[in-house]
Each structure stands twice: as C-alpha cells, then as structure tokens.
Amino acid sequence: MTLSVIAALPFAFGGQDDHHGGNPAFRIVPLLTNARISQLAPVLQTTPAALMGALQQQGYQVASADQTIEQVAATSKADPQHILFQIMPQP
C-alpha cells in the first residue's frame, strides 16, 4: 500500500515542473527528499516522532519534524536518497 501511494505521487504532482517523461519511480525521489518529515511520515505509515527516532537511531542528526530529508542529509553528511531508501517500509 505504501509503495502504491509513493508511486502515485508523481501523477498527483505532474505538471508542476518542466521535466517531462522519465520513470515515475525516479521522479518521485526529489519530491520525497524535499518533503518535511512531518509530511513524509504519514506517507510512510508512521508518525513524525517515530520517523525522527528511526533516523536518529541510524545515526542521522535530526532536530525537528520540519526538516526535510535533504536537510538531514546535509547536516549528517549523507546521501538523501540513501536515507530515504533506509526509512522506506519493506514489503
């Protein structure tokens, strides 16, 4: 279910950028890594507090649910895509 929601997001936000075509699975990554933790948590079927805790448990520096994965990655000197894939629920 979570992956279905994630896969559908590019279609929901389609037309908001100048990029056309391409694999929707790859196009969604920037949308997710630039979403605030508070916005991303429900998509990943968790709470902002639990998502922050999971990120901190993996060694990432998280100060607020208003941060994005991009910001967490910059602060933690990590790749935002790698962080995103680590926190995504497993099927």
Image (cartoon, helix red, strand yellow):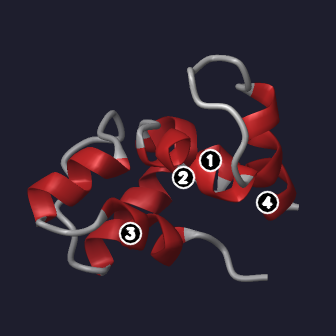
Residue that carries the numbered disc 4 in the rendered image: 2
User: Foreground mark, 4 or 1?
Assistant: 1
Dot placed on the residue nearer the N-terminal end, 3 or 4? 4
Residue that carries the numbered disc 2 in the rendered image: 29
Question: On the rendered image, what quadrant is the N terminus found in?
Answer: bottom right
Can I make out residue 78 in this image? Answer: yes
**Residue density around tag 1, few if under 14, some if 14–19, many if 20 or more, within 10 Å:** some
Residues at marks 4 and 1, CA–CA distance in whole angstroms: 13 Å
Residue that carries the numbered disc 3 in the rendered image: 83
**Residue density around tag 4, few if under 14, some if 14–19, many if 20 or more, within 10 Å:** some
**Mark 2 residue element:** helix
**Residue density around tag 3, few if under 14, some if 14–19, many if 20 or more, within 10 Å:** some
Dot placed on the residue nearer the N-terminal end, 3 or 2? 2
Q: Disc 1, disc 2: CB below 8 Å?
A: yes
Q: Amino acid at mark 2?
A: Val
**Mark 4 residue element:** helix
- x and y, in percent, of residue 61 in the image: 16, 62
Vertical arrangement, residue 89 with respect to residue 4, above or below: below
